[in-house]
Image (spheres, rainbow, N blue to C red):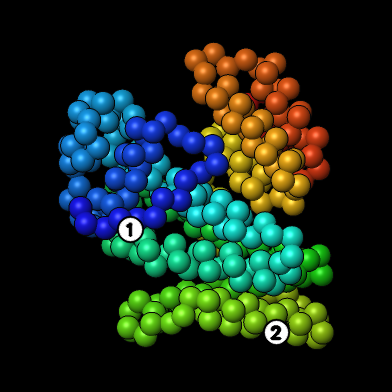
Amino acid sequence: MTHEFSRKELTVPLDPKKLQVLHMALTFFSEKGYLSTSMQEIAAACGMSKGSLYKLFPSKEELLVQTFDYHQEAMFEQAARQTMAAELRPSERLVERLIVQIDDFLEKRAFISMQFRELPVQESEKLAALLRRNKQRMRQWHYDCLREAYGEPVQPYIWDLVMIYQGILKEYLFIHLQEHAPLSVREVATYLVGRMDAIVHDLLTTSPPPLLQHLALHDDCRPCVPPTKQDVLRALGSAIERATLTVACRDEARQTYELLVQETEAAEPRRFLIRALLSDLAAEPALQLAAEAVRKDWL
């Protein structure tokens, strides 16, 4: 394996062996593809037996799912960490988050394109669900980013704005990759956000009827598979990173979240302790909804 990916790791660390496998799987799946990669190769590259690898990931399919989930969530958290500076205006924060996303896409383009090129989604509902879920997560993240950047006034147009934003970004990335027209990532991000500023101004000035406000979005615009308990728990961790909190409050919330994750992974989770940790997190208004979602799933 020749490519070294930057290590974007989650706030709550995983078991070191599991983390090593997820990074190695990213490299193998990117360079050899999903179908041509064997669990034996990944195990050998990680210095462990195939049996030890199967104890961590029961199948190659499950390893791929967790590799996608981990690295997507790591990108979301990196974008949140890099835009915490209080002096950033909302539009500047949107630019910085877009830069993180584009850089991540360019670095992992082989891995990302592999999902469309060779995943046997017709034969595996689990892999088909993975693609739907990841698409929905990205769409929801763009929703959150645009909502934060432009505020309450754009709410009637928010899904129109998400579609416009994703469409423009997709075409610029296509030009960059397929037509060999290298573009400055910062220039693209700044330009795209500038165009979104103009579109938002026009919508709020002319007030046309929104196209998607009263329309039932296509199935792939909504979660097609109910989120798992782990998805809901990870969403709480992401909410901690995205929320506007003081440094002290964020550090305390991270510590509480780490204890919560450890307790949910215990052989016999203590419900009273989970309840107490969630109550502590829900005391912060910005985390109430995410904490309540975890409470509903775990208690």
The spot of residue 74 in percent (x, y) is: 49, 49
Kindly state the secondary structure of the residue where label 1 is placed: helix
Asked whether, in this view, residue 18 is left or right of residue 36, the answer is right
Residue at 32% x, 39% y is 21
User: Is residue 232 placed above or below 186 in the rendered structure?
Assistant: above
What kind of residue is marked 1?
Phe
- Residue at image mark 1: 111
- Residue at image mark 2: 198
Identify the image quadrant of residue 50: top left
Q: Is residue 24 something one can see in this rendering?
A: yes
The spot of residue 297 in percent (x, y) is: 63, 30
User: Is residue 130 placed above or below 276 in the rendered structure?
Assistant: below
Kindly state the secondary structure of the residue where label 2 is placed: helix
The spot of residue 134 in percent (x, y) is: 48, 53
Quadrant including the C terminus = top right
Asked whether, in this view, residue 50 is left or right of residue 136, the answer is left
Q: Residues within 10 Å of mark 1 (few under 14, many from 20)?
A: many
What kind of residue is marked 2?
Ala
Between 160 and 141, the one nearer to me in the picture: 141
Q: Is residue 156 something one can see in this rendering?
A: no
